[in-house]
């Protein structure tokens, strides 16, 4: 199994000093990634999340709303489908392989933009997440889900039972996929938010989605205050979020798993350059 770490677009929020910190001009723009996985399964391809789609990148305000477009600074890059074409042209991925399955960490609009580019793929998701989207906009709902991303009618496969124990987390096997790929319950950011664990020859990797926007959290520190506020406003269950984060910090510190989240560029850079 081969894993490609790809970013499908970027977030470049204004006032870096307030929204991201780290190197770079405090008044300039920050840069967050939208970390997705392309997994080669031998005879087919699998995606974890789909990031921004081409339409989102070309018309962020219209597609994503002011929260992601203005405050988040949703920005251009290559969509996953465009990157897969390039990988095939370069011989990095066999031309005959197609995306048959997509596993979603959750259904926020910055993770679902590429779904329509793979209309025949089966889309694996926590059932709670699907219900939350179908219930329609609640608090923050209008800034959360992008209905246009689902207009093609995805072939959903939903999960409600998490019977396995994976390093202390509740987990589930995925229908039609190998046993070394698991859906891991990580509630808090959304009620049905999940991570995706994949066992490789170098050990387990965990895509922990939006369990933490910034790597500071995973080091037991705090990111800039404005980012904490934005993150807090989007949490659907703050105590579950804290519990998931504490468990992730312990897992990371144990050194048993390579752990990364959706938006942090530091973790992405280490894995994308492998
Ligand atoms: Zn996100």
Image: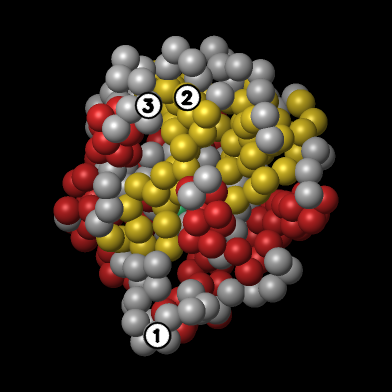
State how far apart marks 3 and 1 are (Cα): 38 Å
Q: Please tell me whether mark 3 or mark 2 is closer to you in this view.
A: 3
Question: Between disc 3 and disc 2, whose residue precedes?
Answer: 2
Observer-nearest residue: 237 or 57?
A: 57
Does residue 121 appear to the left or right of 250 in the view shown? left
Q: Position of residue 111 (x, y in %)?
A: 40, 45
The residue labelled by disc 1 is 25
User: Which element type, helix, strand or loop, lies under badge 1?
Assistant: loop
User: Which element type, helix, strand or loop, lies under badge 3?
Assistant: loop
Q: Position of residue 200 (x, y in %)?
A: 65, 30
Q: Position of residue 5 (x, y in %)?
A: 47, 43
Residue 222 higher or lower than 88, as above or below: below
Q: Which residue is painted at 52% across and 40% down in the image? A: 105
Residue 117 visible, this orientation:
no
| Marks 3 and 2 close (CB-CB < 8 Å) | yes
Does residue 213 appear to the left or right of 55 in the view shown? right
Instruction: Characterize the local packing of mark 2: few (<14), some (14-19) or many (20 or more) Cα atoms within 10 angstroms.
Output: some
Instruction: Characterize the local packing of mark 1: few (<14), some (14-19) or many (20 or more) Cα atoms within 10 angstroms.
Output: few
Q: Position of residue 237 (x, y in %)?
A: 62, 55
The residue labelled by disc 2 is 40
Q: Which residue is painted at 56% across and 17% down in the image? A: 177
Residue 205 higher or lower than 61, as above or below: above
User: Which element type, helix, strand or loop, lies under badge 2?
Assistant: strand
The residue labelled by disc 3 is 93
Q: Which residue is painted at 36% across and 87% down in the image? A: 27
């Amino acid at each position: 199994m081969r894993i490609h770490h790809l970013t499908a677009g970027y977030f470049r929020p204004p006032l870096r000093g307030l929204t991201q910190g780290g190197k770079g001009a405090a008044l300039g723009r920050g840069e967050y990634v939208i970390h997705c996985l392309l997994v080669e399964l031998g005879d087919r391809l699998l995606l974890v999340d789909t990031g921004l789609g081409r339409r989102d990148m070309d018309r962020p305000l219209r597609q994503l709303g002011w929260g992601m477009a203005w405050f988040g600074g949703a920005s251009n890059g290559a969509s996953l489908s465009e990157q897969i074409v390039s990988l095939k042209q370069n011989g990095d991925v066999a031309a005959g392989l197609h995306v048959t399955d997509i596993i979603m960490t959750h259904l926020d609009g910055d993770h679902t933009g590429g779904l329509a580019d793979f209309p025949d793929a089966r889309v694996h998701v926590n059932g709670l997440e699907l219900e939350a989207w179908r219930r329609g906009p609640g608090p923050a709902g209008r800034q959360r889900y992008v209905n246009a991303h689902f207009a093609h009618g995805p072939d959903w496969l939903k999960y409600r039972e998490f019977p396995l124990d994976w390093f202390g987390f509740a987990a589930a096997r995925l229908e039609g996929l190998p046993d070394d790929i698991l859906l891991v319950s990580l509630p808090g950011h959304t009620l049905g938010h999940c991570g995706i664990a994949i066992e490789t020859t170098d050990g387990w990797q965990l895509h922990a989605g939006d369990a933490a926007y910034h790597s500071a959290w995973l080091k037991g520190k705090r990111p800039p205050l404005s980012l904490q506020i934005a993150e807090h406003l989007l949490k659907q269950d703050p105590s579950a979020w804290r519990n998931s984060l504490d468990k992730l910090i312990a897992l990371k510190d144990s050194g048993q798993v390579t752990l990364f989240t959706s938006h942090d560029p530091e973790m992405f850079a280490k894995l994308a350059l492998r």
